[in-house]
């Protein structure tokens, strides 16, 4: 069953006076809207490089959104009658 979809993502970055950068990532699927949040704070001893705060906050917002999507997908799978997957195995060399 072929399927094509286009989801829109908007990233909003805000830097506050205290050196905190906040990110809000909004995913619009056309039927659902989800929002991921992230933040980064510049340590007082570090050089203030706004791009680093943007990257950290945006990455954390993306991570938050990805966790939400995975939870929703797992719930949708269960709703279809499938069992929840067991804990994922870690890829590693045998001990």
Image: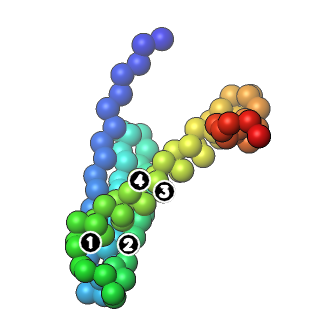
How far is mark 1 from mark 3, CA to CA?
17 Å
Q: Residue at x 30, y 69 (%)?
A: 53
**Residue 81, x across and y down, in percent:** 74, 28
Circle number at residue 62: 4
Sequence-first disc among 1 and 2: 1
- 3D distance between C-alphas at marks 2 and 4: 13 Å
Q: Which residue is mark 1?
A: 14
- Quarter placement of the C terminus: top right
Q: Percent x, y for residue 78?
A: 70, 35
Label 3: which secondary element: helix
Q: CA distance from mark 1 to mark 2?
A: 10 Å
Q: Mark 3 touching mark 2, by CB under 8 A?
A: no
Mark closer to the chain start, 1 or 3: 1
Callouts 1 and 3 close, C-beta under 8 Å: no
Mark toward the viewer: 2 or 4: 2
Visible residue check, residue 22: yes
Q: Give the mark toward the camera: 3 or 2.
A: 2
Q: Earlier in the sequence, mark 2 or mark 4?
A: 2
Residue designated by label 3: 64
Name the spot of residue 57 as percent of width and height, x first.
36, 65
Q: Earlier in the sequence, mark 1 or mark 4?
A: 1
Give whichever of 91, 21 is nearer the camera. Answer: 91
Q: Residue furthest front?
A: 95
Cα distance in 3D space between marks 1 and 4: 15 Å
Q: Disc 4 on helix, strand or loop?
A: helix
Circles 4 and 3, Cβ within 8 Å, touching? The answer is yes
Q: Which residue is mark 2?
A: 40
Q: Going by the image, does 33 lie left or right of 16?
A: right
The mark closer to the camera, 1 or 2, is: 2
Q: Residue 58: percent from the left, percent from the top? A: 34, 59
């Amino acid at each position: 069953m072929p399927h094509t979809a286009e989801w829109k993502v908007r990233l909003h970055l805000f830097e506050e006076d205290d050196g905190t950068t906040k990110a809000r990532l909004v995913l619009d699927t056309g039927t659902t809207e989800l929002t991921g949040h992230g933040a980064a704070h510049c340590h007082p001893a570090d050089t203030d490089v706004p791009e680093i705060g943007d990257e950290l906050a945006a990455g954390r917002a993306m991570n938050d959104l990805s966790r939400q999507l995975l939870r929703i997908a797992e719930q949708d799978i269960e709703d279809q009658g499938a069992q929840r997957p067991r804990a994922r195995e870690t890829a590693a060399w045998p001990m």
